[in-house]
Amino acid sequence: MLTLHSNFFLPDAPGRIHGLVEALCRSENRIFYRTERTSCREYKADMHSLFRLVRVLRGSYIYTICRNDEIRKITLCPGDVLFCARQGTTRAHLEKNSGTVMLTLSFFPQFIRFLISETLEQEGQTVAHHYWYHTNRPLSEAGWNVLHALNALSQTSEEFPSLFDLVRFLFRHCDESLAGDTAQGRTRALMTYQRINAYLTENLHRHINRESVARKMKLSPSHVSKLFRQFGDQSFNQTLRRMRLELALDLLRENVLSVKEIADQCGFSSPGYFIETFRNSFGKSPGDYRLN
């Protein structure tokens, strides 16, 4: 069955989502983790550098997740939370059911993305509508600390009764990021620039460049460069290289993946090019950085 997707910017999101997030702070259900372990690499890797919280609002979603070296399917029902760990997760097989509404919070360094996804059956086809909004502010420092705590807990096999307190705390801080937020003053050019940065962050594991991103965004390569000159402090290529190196630093600190795997998951064309770029930027090889 063909699934059709459409994406819409949600300019009045702060007011519409505020009440929704406030309600989520009061509800309590189950928490699941989606995190890659060594034995899960038989699944197609989908490396991303973002923390995500997924919450089903209506209907149900079926995910295939990797948890503590075990692959299993879970059904997310209204109120359930799926925490997607930041490092090296695999792409979960997702079965979409008609009439399902889901909220996904993705935590970027510069902003929080609220994404409401709704699936409908229309003339024998599954149609998925996605409504997104990027906040003007990133998550607070306290919120990031909670994300890192959840990430650490996701690596254990224990269950902690305070997990929902952490999740509720996180939802409240997301709500605070929405407080007073407005889409007024945001030009189409600025929103396009934000979308490109979000796309880069989510696709660092792919061999992307200015031309491929321009095609994805239906822009000319020169226009992409113009946006980075207008709103950024680095060129497109400099920004992409910085993002890849920052992700590599995080993965080296975690000391789970080999240098070759990190090079691949950060989108470098070869381990040799990764090592050369890393040494030119930091004055030492990835291996030496990891030892220190």
Image (cartoon, rainbow, N blue to C red):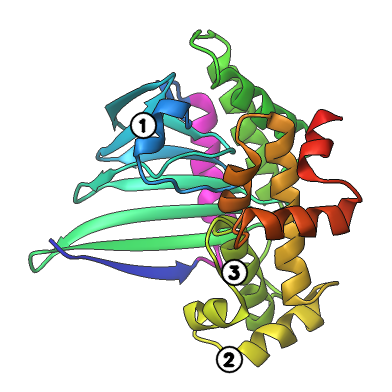
- Quadrant for the C terminus, please: top right
| Magenta residues, dominant SS class | helix
Residue for badge 3: 195
Is 32 placed left or right of 285 in the picture?
left
State which tag comes first along the sequence, 2 or 3. Answer: 3
Image quadrant for the N terminus? bottom left
Q: Indicate the position of residue 26 as horizontal and vertical percent values.
A: 51, 25
The boundaries of the magenta stretch are: 10-26
Q: Element under label 2?
A: loop
Task: Please tell me the numbered disc located at residue 65.
Answer: 1
C-alpha distance separating marks 3 and 1: 27 Å
Relative to 249, 117 lies left or right: left
Residue 175: where, in percent of width, then height? Answer: 63, 42
> Residue 61 falls in which quadrant of the image?
top left
- Badge 3 amino acid: Arg
Q: Which of marks 3 and 1 is nearer the N terminus?
A: 1
Q: Which amino acid does label 1 sit on?
A: Ile
> Mark 2 or mark 3, which is nearer to you?
2
